[in-house]
Image (spheres, rainbow, N blue to C red):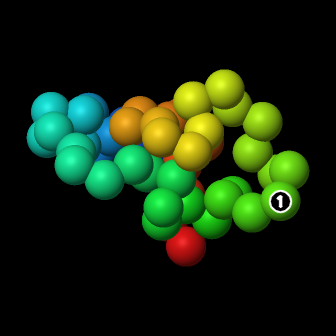
């Protein structure tokens, strides 16, 4: 991850989320995501916007 991505993730972490990340994640289908927080993750290192 680039330095800009790390800075953006830091600031995203400061803002409280009301909707789980999984709702808009590229990996939210089938058995692609194996994280135990799924489908209600509020933070995820693998998150990618659809």
38 to 30, vertically: above or below: above
Q: Would you call the spot at circle 1 few (<14 residues within 10 Å), some (14-19), or many (20 or more)?
A: few
In-front residue for pair 36/46: 36
Which residue lies at the image location 41% right of the left edge and 34% below the top edge? Answer: 43
Locate residue 23 relative to residue 37 in the image: left or right.
Answer: left
Residue at 75% x, 45% y is 33
Closer to us: 31 or 48 = 31
**Residue most extreme to the top:** 36
Q: Which residue is mark 1?
A: 30
Residue at image x 13%, y 41%?
A: 15
Q: Residue at x 82, y 51 (%)?
A: 32
Say if residue 7 shows up in the picture.
Answer: no
Residue 18 rendering spot, x and y as whole percentages: 22, 49
**Closest to the observer: 48 or 22?**
22
Residue situated in front as seen by the camera: 12 or 5: 12
Q: In the picture, residue 14 is in which quadrant?
A: top left
């Amino acid at each position: 991850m680039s330095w800009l991505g790390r800075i953006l993730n830091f600031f995203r972490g400061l803002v409280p989320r009301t909707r789980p990340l999984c709702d808009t994640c590229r990996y939210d289908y089938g058995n692609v995501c194996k994280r135990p927080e799924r489908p209600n993750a509020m933070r995820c290192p693998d998150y990618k916007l659809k």
